[in-house]
Image (cartoon, rainbow, N blue to C red):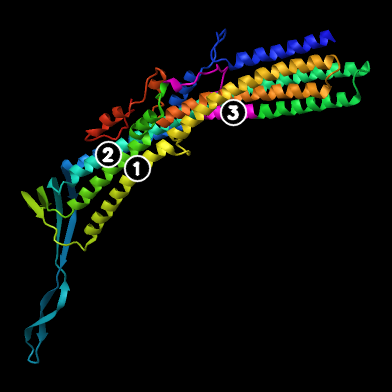
Amino acid sequence: MKAGVLRRGVASAALACALACALAWAFPLAVRADTLEQALAQAYQNNPTLNSQRAVVRATDETVPQALSGYKPTVRVTGTIGQEYTSTVGKTNNTRSVSVLTPTGGTANVSVSAPGVSYPRNAFGYSPNNVAATLTQNIYNGFQTANGVRLAEANTSAARETLRFAEQTVLLNGATAYMDLLRDGALLELQRRNVEVLQEQLRQTRDRFIVGEVTRTDVAQAETRLAQGRAAVLTAESSYARSRGTYRQVIGVEAGTLVPAAPVDRLTPRRLADAIAIARARHPTVGVAMFGIDAAVLQVKINEGTLYPTAQVVATLNNNWETNLTTQLQAFNAFVQAQISVPLYQGGAEYSRIRQAKETAGQKRLDLETARDAVAYSPNNPVGVVPAWGQLEASKAQILATQAQVAASEIALNGVREEARVGQRTTLDVLNAQQDLVTARTALVTAQHDRVVASYILLAAVGELNLPKLGIMIPLYDPMVHYQQVRDAWIGVRIPDGR
């Protein structure tokens, strides 16, 4: 009996040691392993959703040189070359003289006219050619070009804020996927160790049944718990496989040996009010809403510009030449003219568009307030600061509670085993105590997982989840590089790399 108790104690101690190693926040590594920081760096570089959003920003950058083209002249050259053939056909009348014998034996000459029987033809070949060049330069269009450039820049800035939000989302998903896989791996190991303990418990129960210390009911109870434990292992394996797939999708590479990670709530403000203030000012969704207001106001000005006069300069060069068999004609002319157009009435559509743009601008101002309230209080995606703060505080308390639960369950299990050894407890009592300990350790693993994930959620809610803030030093994607590469480009169809 003492040997059996000793074996159970050794198994329990081995299980506790394994969980302590799996859930400690840091420990010396004998082999190479993946850290959360490495996983986030890989997600930043490899995640297809993030790379897609970067391409969206680069495409939006091109709207700025498109708007700037309104300041630049347009030049058009046209040329024609051809061959012209002209043929003229006319009719003529023919007159013939005929000698006729008279009654007196003489002859007389008679002129007879007949319809035209010959067709003179005049044919000419021409080569008409023309080359013309036209240059048009906008001088004034009611400031539509200037406001259009500002509108394009506002949209580009909004796209960069959207990219920043996408980066936060990918990093948060990466941290969650990493911790989910770490949690499910620990739970799988926990269930496997639990099966080992239950197998030992069943073996001892059968031995005691042979010597008459317990009944067949005790053996059946031990067999039932072992079957439940094996089913739990299969469920844990399924969850672990699912988490590995999610990790591969988010991080972009297969998972290796994962190192436990530490929470990052040290990087967030110490007071809830400070966190709310920072989020309302710096969160990416707030930035998108602010640039949306700028774009809407500029659209009003662009629509108002359609009511103003427009002025432009047009310069034209025209060269014509014509060649035939005998002569060559050439004509060249050039002129420059200023064109001024004053709109008087255009059916009223322009006034409607101005009113419509003003309503949109008012909507965008309301959207800004909605975005600020959402980042502060919304429990949805993105999670607001207040719900994230409460979730983090609850996870901290949950860890303390589950640690106490694990400690108490270990004491209770040891006590029940000793009491069962002297006949004061049944086999079912031991099995229940063992299950209580597994449940407590499962809760502790989950609470430690939730503690880390909640700290990342809060950092994202504040709007400061980024690699520099986390201290991950890798080359970062700078959207300004591509913007500067294309902003002042006059010609070219090759795509710059943006790096």
Horizontal relation, residue 416 to residue 130: left or right: right
At label 2, the amino acid type is Ala
Magenta segment: does it hold 452? no
Q: Which mark is residue 369?
A: 1
Real-space CA distance between mark 3 and mark 2, rounded to the nearest whole angstrom: 40 Å
- Dot 3 alpha-carbon crowd within 10 angstroms: few under 14, some 14 to 19, many 20 or more: many
Q: Can residue 252 be seen in this view?
A: no
Residue stretch in magenta: 239-266
Give residue 347's position: percent from left, percent from top. 21, 63
Q: Seen from this angle, which residue lies furthest bottom?
A: 103
- Dot 2 alpha-carbon crowd within 10 angstroms: few under 14, some 14 to 19, many 20 or more: many
Horizontal relation, residue 494 to residue 38: left or right: left
Question: Quick check: 273 above or below 318?
Answer: above
Please tell me whether mark 3 sits on a helix, a strand or a loop: helix
Q: Residue at x 22, y 62 (%)?
A: 348
Horizontal relation, residue 419 to residue 32: left or right: right
Q: Is residue 352 visible?
A: yes
Between circles 2 and 1, the one closer to the viewer is 1
Q: According to the image, label 3 marks what residue? A: 243
Q: Residue at x 21, y 35 (%)?
A: 490
Q: Seen from this angle, which residue lies furthest front?
A: 424
At label 1, the amino acid type is Glu
Magenta segment: does it hold 264? yes
Q: Nearer the viewer, residue 179 or 74?
A: 179
Q: Which of 204 and 54 is in front in this view?
A: 204
Real-space CA distance between mark 1 and mark 3, rounded to the nearest whole angstrom: 37 Å
Q: Residue 154 carries which label?
A: 2
Give residue 119's position: percent from left, percent from top. 16, 69
The disc, 1 or 3, on the residue closer to the chain's N-terminal end is: 3
Quadrant in the picture for the N terminus: top right
